[in-house]
Amino acid sequence: MTPAASPAPSGIHHIKLPVTDLERSAQWYGAVLGARRLTKLDHRRPDGTLFTVVLDVPGLGTHLELRLDPATATALERYDFLTLAVDDRAALDRWIAHLDTLGVPHSPPVVALVGWLLVVPDPDGQRLRFYTTTPHGLDPSHVEYDSPWLSTGPAATDAEPRPTSITTVTARPGATGELELLLTEFATKTRREAGCLAFRVHRTPSAPDAFIIYEEWTSRQALNAHHATPHMDTFGSDAAHLTASPPHTQQLAPCP
């Protein structure tokens, strides 16, 4: 018996993206992509709670739905969920100028497998990408396989273990809330750095004034670059009067 032909969809209805803050993400995509919020399509629960915002993005060809889902958004941090086409390197440079005007962090132009690539982390660290439809025409030896902005999957072997550590920071009495806000802001900036695989701040009920930071980097060079960033210096000076003792860091080693 000849199998029946598969029915074909008529197109993409919409793209859904999990976020931790609807208003923040809607404003970000509005500024970066010129997206317009379609308030008539806001999704609310019976009690009136807003849980979805729908955006009309010029050139996307479909709607972008922002769904309030902090757990999933956090789990997908660094995932490159959407790649937009741009014509060529000149067009990519115009996007870079636009992002710089807005003060939005982004990667440098990356030599990808076929074209030029620009990567822009959104407010949750999920990666919006711009890829040129015109090939860069460079020899394959120029492809930046080692760039932390180019997702090529895990390497078969690692020449050296990725720098991984746990740091404990304890707040002085009465400064826990202020230190938490400072750590949260610092973590957000750090996760956007090239080479940062993870940087998460945790609390434990057994020590309510202590914060535990887990971090992982692609290389020692990336970690060294992190230590030289302006926000690292700012955090060190701002946190000095909020902590009860110097931070204690333990380096981690992978099990065989």
Image: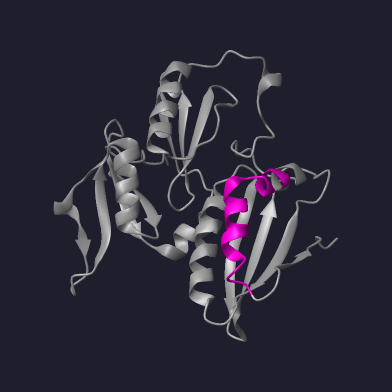
> Hey, which quadrant is residue 152 in on the image?
top right
Which quadrant does the N terminus fall into? top left
**67 with respect to 236 (left or right):** left
Residue 140, position as x, y percentages in the image: 67, 19
Instruction: Name the residue: 62% across, 72% down.
Output: 243
Q: Pick whichever, 103 or 47, lies toward us.
A: 103
Residue 247 visible in image:
yes
Which quadrant does the C terminus fall into? bottom right
Residue 73 higher or lower than 13, as above or below: below
Q: Is residue 92 magenta?
A: no
Instruction: Name the residue: 63% across, 58% down.
Output: 236
> Hey, which quadrant is residue 250 in on the image?
bottom right
Q: Pick whichever, 186 or 46, lies toward us.
A: 186
Residue 68, position as x, y percentages in the image: 34, 61
Instruction: Name the residue: 73% across, 46% down.
Output: 224
The type of colouring in the image is one colour
Hey, which residue is sitting farthest right in the picture?
256
* Range drawn in magenta: 224-243
Residue 231 higher or lower than 111, as above or below: below
User: Mostly what secondary structure, the magenta segment?
Assistant: helix
Residue 141, position as x, y percentages in the image: 71, 20
